[in-house]
Amino acid sequence: NAGVTQTPKFQVLKTGQSMTLQCAQDMNHEYMSWYRQDPGMGLRLIHYSVGAGITDQGEVPNGYNVSRSTTEDFPLRLLSAAPSQTSVYFCASSYGQGARGYTFGSGTRLTVV
Amino acid sequence: SQQGEEDPQALSIQEGENATMNCSYKTSINNLQWYRQNSGRGLVHLILIRSNEREKHSGRLRVTLDTSKKSSSLLITASRAADTASYFCATDYRGSTLGRLYFGRGTQLTVWP
């Protein structure tokens, strides 16, 4: 089925470990974004990309890296996990500047202990 | 923060009643979008309204936009138990990078059978 696929769905990390959250879309969308959702905080933008090879920081980029080597994939890397990064992470994509709305993945629930 | 704000934070109604949620934002927008999130799931795009539009309909959904008051409302008519979810407004601010969305904290809607 067409859409945004996120893996893994659940992950537990120890403080200081690194990992990559995967995100792939098969809709040929130009725009892709990573958000984190914390209780009572809504969604906050971490990083976004307007096309292959182009990325930029969002509201809360510290501790995260991204790259966009292909249109389909937009992985999010946690460099050295901290308990403050415990959250639910959502990847989203959109055709052309988001003016038709974003398609969201089902999320990755990350716990850092 | 550029986040919009939804009001109320929580809303509880009976099936068949109408549900109205409001969103206020801070600066001029290109468009405003509404999303639904069922518990433990990703967000689903419901409707997008552009800054030059005042009202849009989609099935049982009606969205209004008042740019002079910097506010929007989402009306769900004849609510069903399946409408139970969190509802978020997201704003695409004029002057911000196109397609970059700012989400509010959401309204939790509960519809009782």
Image (cartoon, helix red, strand yellow):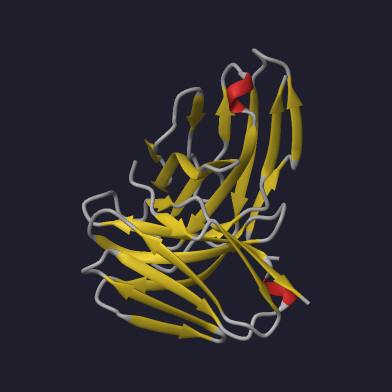
**Residue A2 seen by the camera:** no
In the image shown, does B21 or B54 lie closer to the viewer?
B21
Spot occupied by residue B48 in the image (x, y as percentages of width and height): 42, 71
In the foreground, A45 or B104: B104
- Is A66 on the left-hand or right-hand side of B64? right
Who's the residue at 40% across and 53% down the image?
A: B101
Q: Quadrant of residue A89?
A: top right
- In the depicted structure, whether residue A82 falls above or below residue A42: above
Quadrant housing the N terminus of chain A = bottom right
Vertical relation: A5 (above or below) A1: above
Question: How many numbered marks have been drawn onto this rendered protein structure?
Answer: 0
Q: Is residue A34 left or right of residue B5?
A: right
Residue A74: percent from the left, percent from the top?
54, 42
Q: Residue lying at the far top in this picture: please name it.
A: A16
Most foreground residue, B13 or A109: B13
Residue B10 x %, y % = 59, 59
Where's the C terminus of chain A, which quadrant? top right
Q: Nearer the viewer, residue A27 or B89?
A: B89
Q: Is residue A20 left or right of residue A29?
A: right
Residue at (48%, 46%) from the top-left corner? Answer: A33
Q: Position of residue B99 (x, y in %)?
A: 36, 56
- Asked if one can make out residue B24 in the rendered structure from this viewpoint, the answer is yes
Q: Quadrant of residue A20?
A: top right
Name the image quarter holding residue B110: bottom right
Q: Is residue A80 above or below residue A70?
A: above
